[in-house]
Amino acid sequence: MKISAFERAANYVILVLFAFVVFAPIGVILTLAFGPQNAAAERAGGAFHPENFADAWVIGRFGQYMVTSVVVAVIVVVLAVTASILAGYALGTMRFAGQGLVFLLFLLGIMVPTEAFVVPLFFDLRQLGLTNTVWGVALPQVAMSIAFGTYWMRTYFRSSSVALIEAARLDGAGSMRILWQILVPVGRPAILTLVLLVFMWTWNEFLIPLVMSPNATIRTAPLGLAFFQGQYTQGTALLAAGAVLVAAPVVVLYIFLQRHFIRGMLEGAVRE
């Protein structure tokens, strides 16, 4: 179907408007991050101050918080993605009693908000001695991510080529060999999309680290940024620089995985 010049122009106008809505706040944050911290700094060094990032890094102790966030994110991504692949493979390709009920339990994990169980979960983990530890922060997020990850991988495995699986079985391949040597390499876009989503959710999580570490011994980057904001409410330049530092790992990871992410999202959109 041929698109008229008016429709094409209207599409571009709409795209430009949405791009402005998305990029305008980012531009404001970057402008503040490179701006002067105060009037004295503006008179001394002009309008461009990249040293704000170094100052925010040292004053806000973002180096320590970044390391904690990376450790927590690696634990959550590895455990959650691995468990999601195994559970999604079982629910998507195998038939067993109670399969529908098990899948509904995973869906229930997606629907229940964190605020509904965080308080009793804190007392359970405190009784086990896991509060104020990396595992106390990571394990709840592993469980939260597995719920969506299982649904995501089940959708992929249900749409996998049955002929490919049957051919592998005829060649003597077992279930685990079919999964790791055939289906996983083919499903790399879906898996990398799940990796990016889980990493992003884990990196941005605020409530779990706040509640599970009441002594503030385990403080992630977003949590550190919130406390940094409380200490430097007047220093908008340092706050903006800290916000850019915290957001940078997610942006960098997305840039590297964007091709696989977009492909995985598009493939998921045409499946069940």
Image (cartoon, helix red, strand yellow):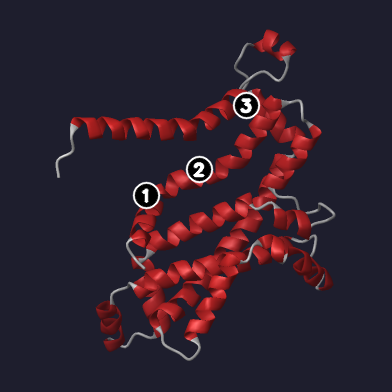
- Residue occupying the far top of the picture: 43
Q: Quadrant of residue 188?
A: bottom left
Residue holding disc 2: 252
Q: Earlier in the sequence, mark 1 or mark 2?
A: 2
Question: Which of the numbered marks, if any, corresponds to residue 33?
Answer: 3
Residue at 50%, 43% (x, y): give it: 252
**Would residue 130 be seen by someone viewing this image from the given angle?**
no
Label 1 crowding class (10 Å Cα cut-off): few <14, some 14-19, many 20+? few
Quote the CA–CA distance across marks 1 and 2: 13 Å
Q: Circle 1 — which element?
A: helix
Q: How many marks?
A: 3
State which mark lies toward you, 2 or 3.
3
Asked whether 151 or 216 is in front, the reply is 151
The residue type indicated by label 2 comes to Val
Residue at 74%, 39% (x, y): give it: 61
Asked whether 103 or 55 is in front, the reply is 103
